[in-house]
Amino acid sequence: MWERRYARRLSLTDAAIVVTVTALAGVLDVLMAPAGAAELVHAARVTALTAPVWLLALALFRTRTTDAVGVGATEYKRVAHATGLAFGLLALLFIAFQWQDVRVQLFATLPVGLFALLVGRWIWRKWLLGQRAFGRYATRTIIAGTNDDIEYVIRSLERAGNRGYIVVGAATTEPMADGLIVDGRAYPVVGTIDSVAVHARELGADSIIVASRPAGDPDFIKRLSWDLEGTASELILSSRLTDVAGPRLSLRPMDGLPLIHVQIPEFEGGIHLLKRAMDIAVAALALIPIALATPVIALLIKLDDRGPAFFRQTRVGRDGREFGILKFRTMRTTAETELDALRAQNEGAGPLFKLKRDPRITRVGAVLRKFSLDELPQFWNVLRGEMSVVGPRPPLPSEVTAYDGTVYRRLYIKPGITGLWQVSGRSDLSWDESIRLDLRYVENWSVMTDLMIMWRTAKVMVTPKGAY
């Protein structure tokens, strides 16, 4: 199976990184310590202990299993947790045995090694997604359940876009003579759900996704798992808990009854203090190069049409509080008065006004918008606490007046300079898709998700899409 081959490649890469980093740290430790046989033995002993403990932690945290590889946040989070636990245990061992001069291993190997591991996983993940674009290294799957539930799972897989699953057939609760049509694409119906295990063997399916079980058959899942024993097929249960991500879900078995606990979203508390601390750190660092670039950008804007360099606009922040957003000016100074004459040409989604070729945009402004440079001054808004680095798009007051109770939930946290909308298509998104992404972020955000969005934003700025 491709999963085993891919896991072996990850294992070799992890081992190469861990051994190289720990060995270099050992050499550095020797160079920093007084010369002598005792120091060499000590450095070799620390290095020989660090590498296997680290690799064992990566294995125990299931960093190379099929439910983690290629997923992104889950894989990176497991690697980070495994590394943290490994070095925590090593620190305890060093203290227990009173080994001295292990600072290099703890304060150099940890950050450098973790960064190298994450970069290695990212490179392999990009390679895997590239292979999946050609239909390789993907899981062949059969989806079982009612027609409605099967269609829901298929649409969700297609929306994910990474082609991790290839649907080779559907097993329905009721016999069907024709195939199943979802969004204009036909999927073969291989039979009924009762015989799905047989069809999985015949088609060589890697997995079966159970979207729903037959009515009145509570033991169906148990029997299906027995039928799949000894095969290469995985059994996956689908849940229609829409837009509830993994961090909020936990499984608690009770006397054979698997209870899925859904954590209620929290919009206050320690985790939000951590987010604020990260915002301050990122904004403070970002404002240093921004301060150096601002005179150059401001001069270019001035030379273009003699107008002001900055543009201030009222936006709505957390809990509906209004604030003044700061941007580099990209439109003519008369842009607001020209808006009514252009409304009939609106190409934006929902209440948003957007034109792909807006005549009000200046020449310098077009370049700034293409690479999202016009939004750099908003890091000052982040430092002031009005915005976050990552969050929903900051709306105009006129947009908020059209919100219903559901859409208003996007104001439960601070708006962001970037977000899921920024790295998923920006102005090319429909209104419903934009709102869905914002609400999903609000309900399920995490520090790891923020870091991944920041990383993806850097890529979007270099290869912009949907920016106009």
Image (cartoon, helix red, strand yellow):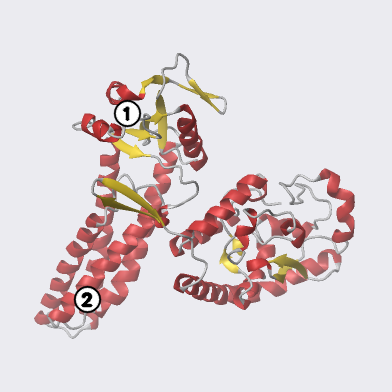
Q: Which mark is residue 174?
A: none
Callout 1: SS: loop
Residue 288: image x %, image y %? Answer: 59, 77
Q: Eyeballing the image, is 430 above or below 407?
A: above
Q: Residue at x 14, y 72 (%)?
A: 44
Give the left or right position of residue 264, taking residue 428 as reference.
left
Give the left or right position of residue 111, taking residue 451 as reference.
left
**Residue 317 visible to an observer of this rendering:** no
Near-viewer residue (220 or 307): 220
> Do residues under tags 1 and 2 come within 8 Å of each other at their CB atoms?
no
Q: Which residue is mark 2?
A: 91
Q: Eyeballing the image, is 241 above or below 288?
A: above
The crowd level at tag 1 (other Cα within 10 Å; few <14, some 14-19, many 20+) is many
Residue 93: image x %, image y %? Answer: 16, 75
Quadrant in which the N terminus is drawn: top left
**Residue 92 visible to an observer of this rendering:** yes
Q: State the image quarter where residue 335 is shown.
A: bottom right
Looking at the image, is mark 1 or mark 2 earlier in the sequence? 2
Callout 2: SS: helix
Q: Residue at x 61, y 59 (%)?
A: 410
Q: Amino acid at mark 1?
A: Ala
Q: Residue at x 83, y 55 (%)?
A: 360
Cα separation between marks 1 and 2: 45 Å
Q: Residue at x 60, y 56 (%)?
A: 461
Q: Amino acid at mark 2?
A: Ala
Q: Nearer the viewer, mark 1 or mark 2?
A: 1
Q: Which residue is mark 1?
A: 205
Near-viewer residue (16 or 309): 309
Residue 23: image x %, image y %? Answer: 22, 67
Q: Eyeballing the image, is 98 above or below 108?
A: below
